[in-house]
Amino acid sequence: MTDGEGSTAEDRFLYLTGELTDEQTQQITARLLENWDQEFLLVINSDGGSSFNALALVNLMREHGRVDTLCVGVALSGAADCLAAGRHRYIVPGAIAMLHQVSWELGREFAANLVQNARFLDRLNTAMADRLAQSTGQTREKLDRDMATDFYLVGQEILDYGVADAYWDPTALLNTRPTRRTRSRILSEPAETGRRSRG
């Protein structure tokens, strides 16, 4: 099946599954850059990964402006940032999201660099939190409190917090356009209520 411009429906799908690796980031980035005028649906089932990769995808998705997101399982850490950055954000009942501060594995770091790297880590965390605040409508103060430790959201909680907009209706695919933080009338009723850099 093709759309009006001759591309197939499958061409619109991007996938973020498992760890948010350099390879996955490169693949998604290439698809977006090579098809800048096309609409996409990013399907997410990921436990996060590199904060740098998450930041790159969030920045690019926001610039692109035509990437919808759908969490079909988990969107943890940086994957939750990607979910929240979508134009229209969907979840399935039972989806799980997790937000937290950026973390850093120092490894064999020189002592002289520790303070510099700590300052950079704080700036990176601020940048990611600022983007989440814009996407979710939550205040920075609330995000800072909630993200001090791993902050899990399940099902309806994801919608209430503003990380996603609505439950996904599989029959609508990319044609459904709900308003931010409200559920479209054609979307299914919720079935339940109730970040790592890894980023």
Image: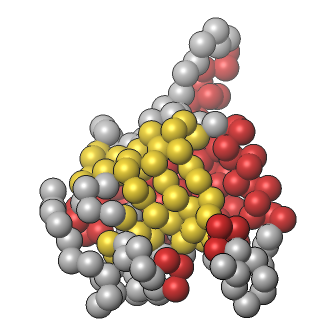
Task: Residue at the far front: name it.
Answer: 1
Question: Residue 149 occupies which quadrant of the picture?
Answer: top left
Viewer-proximal residue among 5 and 107: 5
Residue 23 higher or lower than 163, as above or below: above
Residue 29 is situated, as x and y percent measured from the top left of the image, at 74, 55
The residue under the point 38% across, 48% down is 74
180 vs 48, left or right, is left
- Name which residue lies at 57% across and 68% down: 41
Name which residue lies at 70% across and 74% down: 8
> Viewed as shown, does residue 33 lie left or right of 173?
right
Q: Is residue 146 above or below residue 112?
A: below
Residue furthest out toward the right: 34
Is residue 53 something that shows in the picture?
yes
Q: Residue at x 64, y 13 (%)?
A: 109
Rendering coords of residue 106 (x, y %): 58, 18
Q: Position of residue 150 (x, y in %)?
A: 31, 39
Question: Measured from the top left, where is residue 5 in percent x and y?
Answer: 78, 86
